[in-house]
Amino acid sequence: MTFALIEYGDCIRLPAIHRQAPLTAVLTPFEMFSFFKKKPQEPAALAPAPATPAVEQITLPDAAAPVAPADIVAAVTPVEQKQSWVARLKAGLSKTSSSLTTLFVGAKIDDELYEELESALLMADAGVDATQFLLDELKRKVKNEKLTEAAQVKTALRSLLLEMLTPLQKPLILGQHQPLVMMIAGVNGAGKTTTIGKLAKHLQAHDQSVLLAAGDTFRAAAREQLTVWGERNNVTVIAQESGDPAAVAFDAVHSAQARGTNVVMVDTAGRLPTQLHLMEELKKVKRVMAKAMPSAPHEILLVIDGNTGQNALMQVKAFDDALDLTGLVVTKLDGTAKGGVLAAIARARPIPVYFIGVGEQIEDLQPFNAQEFVEALLG
């Protein structure tokens, strides 16, 4: 079999690489904003790509110069865009916000208030453990601080939620590895492939060259969907019509090393955590990445649908047990999303939430900010 490297608008044929099918690079531009932090120390020198016996005299494009890490304290976002994002987040969580905030209007601090609050938190998908923890801490705070007004209790609840969710707020670190290899997992319908496309644009906003690997070889449309995002973001997409997803990941890491690409994101097939044989396939993909680059994958992200409630927590536990997750992306916090699942995750499996999404547009995916999230819930 042969690979072909296709620059958008031009076609360059390369000699046979090895057993995999076509290597595709698809390019066209557009823009947006992002926030990240970079490791303050200098990155390790870029090692030459390991020799592959079947590769013969391949001429690749000039390697992109590695980006010198620097401390980036969140790029300044225009006030209008920030207000728009916060407004969309509040709209997405409005159902939960309404049920929580109305409890404190003219209420007395008694058992009835706590019972209604318990019901509201459970309905918001906070789960039994997080709900009981919040209620116990709230009662203790009311007693110790001698709170007498419902508004004071609401402020105390806001403080407790912020304290609970702040540990989930963590920036994605760039510049620590060359390339940074990211494995993206999630069940079908969570928005995994779309999230990869949005993340690619965020990374490019911080001068990172990106390569995408279409490792979801089980879903027919996944490869085409990722290719479209490659065209939009002007990035290379490695894909094959059929075959072993682990082999696609292996070739993607080697290609990124040879070309000096900063970040590799590997899409994987969506599957339910109960499908044990498919979860084993994910473990295989992870092992094969480590063969291509011993420290890889450096980030293993799970994309979860914010509408799925406690089922999302079950997914986090199952995928974390199988893959040792390093971060989460919570999508679709709009419409019927309840938002309380983040409290459940914070209590049961406090894995960093790198990004949250409130819609289909690229600007609808933003880094998780605990303060903004709590304000959207409680005003």
Image: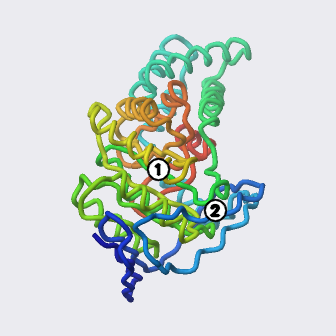
Q: Amino acid at mark 1?
A: Met
Identity of the residue drawn at 58% across and 64% down: 262
The answer to whether mark 2 and mark 1 are in CB contact below 8 A is no
In the rendered structure, which amino acid carries the disc numbered 2?
Answer: Ala
At x 54%, y 49%, the residue is 296
Q: Which disc number belongs to residue 47?
A: 2
Residue 50: % across, % down:
53, 61
Q: Confirm whether residue 362 shows in the render.
A: no
| Secondary structure found at label 2 | loop
Name the residue rendered at 24%, 54% in the picture: 219
The x, y position of residue 350, in whole percent, is 55, 31
* Left or right, residue 240 beside residue 118: left
Q: Nearer the viewer, residue 160 or 47?
A: 47
Which of 55 and 126 lies nearest the eye of the viewer? 55
Name the spot of residue 24 as percent of width and height, x first: 36, 73
Q: Based on the displayed image, in which of its 4 quarters is residue 10 positioned? A: bottom left
Q: Residue at x 45, y 37 (%)?
A: 323
Q: Quadrant of the C terminus?
A: top right
Q: Earlier in the sequence, mark 2 or mark 1?
A: 2
**Looking at the image, residue 260 lies above or below residue 120:** below
Residue 352's disc is: none
- Badge 2: how crowded within 10 Å, few (<14), some, or many (20+)? few
Residue nearest the viewer, comparing 70 with 3: 3
Q: In the rendered image, which quarter is residue 6 located in?
A: bottom left
Q: What residue would you read off at disc 1? A: 289
On the question of residue 317 being in view, the answer is yes
